[in-house]
Image (tube, helix red, strand yellow):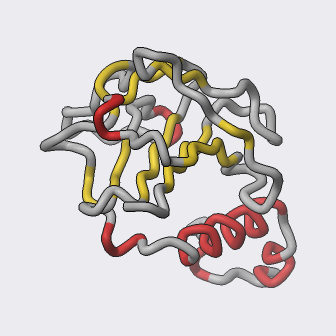
Amino acid sequence: MRRRRPWEFPDGWESRLDTSAVAQLRAIRELWQSWPWWELVPDIDEPLVVAGRGTPWTSDEMIDVLDDEYVTAARTPDGSLAVVYVPTQRTIRLDPALVPESATLEWIDPADATGPRQPATPDGNGDISTPGPNADGDEDWLLMITDRQA
């Protein structure tokens, strides 16, 4: 007998809607909906994150998304918003020329996206470190950079 997958809606699937994972997905969706996400451009040609990204996965071999430790980033062309996903605890370096002095930098806990944000302050070289374990005890964080003057 073939094992049924959750996406096939086996009996009792409704009970899975009231879980912390679903609540986290809802909060992340609402967070992204509050941003002009459609304007974000991948951080490739003029990188905001210039060091500490890790190694990109280049193989055709399949891996679990949770095993990918590469830092990804995107920003709007006008510089009003940048989002950096840091999957593991580390220090990254931002290009100081791409972070205006008027910008606000905040860490967002992806396990508790509606919770309080933590201020983020890069040093003079642009180095900035993740704040430690998130609400679930994991190491991943979102760094949001906003500049209302852009």
Residue 4 in sight from this viewpoint: no
**Residue 116, how many percent across, how many down?**
81, 51
Nearer-the-camera pick, 55 or 112: 112
Residue sitting at 24 percent across and 61 percent down?
77
Location of the C terminus by quadrant is bottom left
Q: Is residue 13 above or below residue 125?
A: below
The quadrant of the image that shows the N terminus is bottom right
Where is 128 relative to 16, above or below? above
Please identify the residue farthest to the left as the structure is shown: 45
Q: Is residue 23 above or below residue 84?
A: below
The residue drawn where x is 29% and y is 25% is: 50
* Quarter-of-image position of residue 26: bottom right
Picture coordinates of residue 51, whole percent (x, y): 33, 20
Image coords of residue 38 (percent x, y): 34, 75
Q: Quarter of the image holding residue 73?
A: top left
Across the whole image, how many numbered discs are drawn on residues? 0
Q: Residue at x 75, y 28 (%)?
A: 133
Residue 129 appears left or right of 101: right
Residue 133 appears in view: yes
Q: Where is residue 56 drawn, in percent x and y?
A: 28, 30
Quick check: 21 left or right of 84? right
The image quarter containing residue 119 is top right
Query: What residue is rendered at 39% in x and 19% in y?
Result: 52
Left or right of residue 50: residue 90: right
